[in-house]
C-alpha cells in the first residue's frame, strides 16, 4: 500500500491505564493502515483491545488515568493530542461511531427525531423544516419503514434492530468520511444481524464511506471487510486481506477463532470447539507471546520472547515464532 493511498493510519499506538508509575499497557505498538473507501475488520475476543483502540482514535478515552502515545493520522492530520475544541469539529462530522449496545445508546427521554435533529443542528447548523426533512431522509436511507412515524417515537417503541438503524442514521447524518462500527450486531438476533450487515454493505457501496468494523465474530467480519486485523492482548497477531485469511489462516489464534465458528465446529468434530483458557489481564501478562499459555503449538521460545510482526508473504503479516521460524527454515 503506497503512503499516498493511506486515509487512516495508526503508528506505534500504545495505550496505558492506571496511575503514573503503576500503569499497564492494554494496546501495544499497533500499526494499521486503511485506504479511502475500504472496510477494515478488527476481530478478537473481548478484552483484546479492539474497542479501546478505536475510542482513542475518537479522543473518547478518559484523560485522568489514561496515556496514549503514538500517531493517529486521519487524512494526514494528527489526532492524538488534538485539543478537544478542535476534535469536536471532526468527531461526529468527519468521523462518526456506531456503538455496540443499541438498547442503551439512545436517550429514553427524547424522541428519535429530537436526537437525530440535534446532530444536524450541532454540526451543520441545520434547523427547522430542512432539519426534519434531512432526518426523514436519513431514516429512509437506513430502511426504517414509515420514517415520519418513527421520527416521533420514543426509543422504547423500537426493537433492537430498529434502534441500531437509528444509531447508524445518526452516524451517517453529516456524511462522514470514516465510520467506526463497534460491534454493531451485538445483542441482536441472527436475522437482524444479517440485515444490519447487509445495510452496512449497501451504504458503503452507495456512499463510498471508509469503515472500521469491530467484532468478535469472524463470520460477521468476513461478510463485510476488505482486510482483517486479528487482535489479541493488545497486539496485532495477524493481518491480511479477507480472502487470504479465510483461505490460509497462519496464526494459531486465528485458526482457533476459525474453528470456533459453528459451521466449521459441527462439520469437523460434531461439537462446538472453544479455545482453552482466557485472555490474560493487563497486569498478569505472560513474559513471552501472550497467546502461548493457550496455544497448542507453543514452544520454548514462545514462553520467553514476544515475537515480532513479520510479513511472511506479500501483504500477509503474522506474529508467531512457529510460523516465522518455519518460513525461514524453508527459504
Image: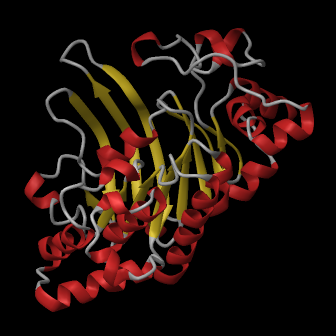
The N terminus - image quarter: bottom right
- Residue 154: x and y, percent? 27, 64
Residue 228 in the figure: left or right of residue 53: right
Quadrant in which residue 253 is drawn: top right
Check the image and report above or below for 7 versus 136: above
| Residue name at image x 64 percent, y 13 percent | 293
Task: Depth check: give the residue in front, 233 or 302.
Answer: 233
Task: Depth check: give the residue in front, 161 or 234.
Answer: 161
The C terminus - image quarter: top right
- Residue 84: x and y, percent? 11, 52
Q: Is residue 249 visible?
A: yes
| Residue name at image x 38 percent, y 50 percent | 103
- Residue sitting at the far left: 85
Residue 285 in the figure: left or right of residue 220: left
| Residue name at image x 18 percent, y 90 percent | 130
Quadrant in which residue 176 is drawn: bottom left
Task: Depth check: give the residue in front, 40 or 73.
Answer: 40
Quadrant in which residue 13 is drawn: top left
Check the image and report above or below for 161 versus 21: below
Check the image and report above or below for 202 versus 285: below
Amino acid at each position: 500500500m503506497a503512503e499516498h493511498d493511506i486515509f487512516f493510519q495508526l503508528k506505534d499506538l500504545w495505550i496505558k491505564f492506571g496511575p503514573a508509575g503503576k500503569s499497564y499497557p492494554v494496546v501495544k505498538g499497533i500499526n494499521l493502515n486503511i485506504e479511502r473507501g475500504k472496510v477494515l475488520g478488527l476481530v478478537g475476543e473481548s478484552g483484546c483491545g479492539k474497542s479501546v483502540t478505536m475510542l482513542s482514535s475518537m479522543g473518547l478515552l478518559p484523560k485522568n488515568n489514561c496515556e496514549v502515545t503514538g500517531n493517529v493520522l486521519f487524512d494526514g492530520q494528527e489526532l492524538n493530542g488534538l485539543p478537544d475544541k478542535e476534535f469536536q469539529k471532526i468527531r461526529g462530522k468527519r468521523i462518526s461511531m456506531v456503538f455496540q449496545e443499541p438498547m442503551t445508546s439512545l436517550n429514553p427521554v427524547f424522541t428519535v427525531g429530537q436526537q437525530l435533529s440535534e446532530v444536524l443542528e450541532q454540526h451543520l447548523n441545520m434547523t427547522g423544516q430542512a432539519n426534519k426533512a434531512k432526518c426523514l431522509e436519513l431514516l429512509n436511507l437506513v430502511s426504517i419503514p414509515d420514517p415520519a412515524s418513527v421520527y416521533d417515537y420514543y426509543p422504547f417503541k423500537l426493537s433492537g434492530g430498529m434502534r441500531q438503524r437509528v444509531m447508524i442514521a445518526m452516524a451517517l447524518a453529516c456524511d462522514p468520511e470514516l465510520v467506526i462500527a463497534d460491534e454493531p450486531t451485538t445483542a441482536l438476533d441472527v436475522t437482524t444481524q444479517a440485515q444490519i450487515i447487509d445495510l452496512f454493505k449497501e451504504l458503503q457501496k452507495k456512499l463510498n464511506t471508509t469503515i472500521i468494523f469491530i467484532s468478535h465474530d469472524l463470520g460477521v467480519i468476513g461478510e463485510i471487510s476488505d482486510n482483517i486485523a486479528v487482535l489479541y492482548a493488545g497486539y496485532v497477531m495477524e493481518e491480511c486481506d479477507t480472502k487470504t485469511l479465510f483461505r490460509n489462516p497462519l496464526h494459531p489464534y486465528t485458526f482457533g477463532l476459525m474453528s470456533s465458528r459453528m459451521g466449521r465446529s459441527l462439520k469437523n468434530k460434531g461439537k462446538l470447539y472453544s479455545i482453552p483458557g482466557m485472555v490474560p489481564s493487563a497486569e498478569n501478562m505472560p513474559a513471552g507471546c501472550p497467546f502461548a499459555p493457550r496455544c497448542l503449538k507453543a514452544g520454548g521460545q514462545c514462553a520467553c520472547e514476544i515475537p515480532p510482526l513479520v510479513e511472511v508473504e506479500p501483504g500477509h503479516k503474522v506474529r508467531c515464532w512457529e510460523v516465522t521460524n518455519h518460513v525461514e527454515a524453508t527459504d
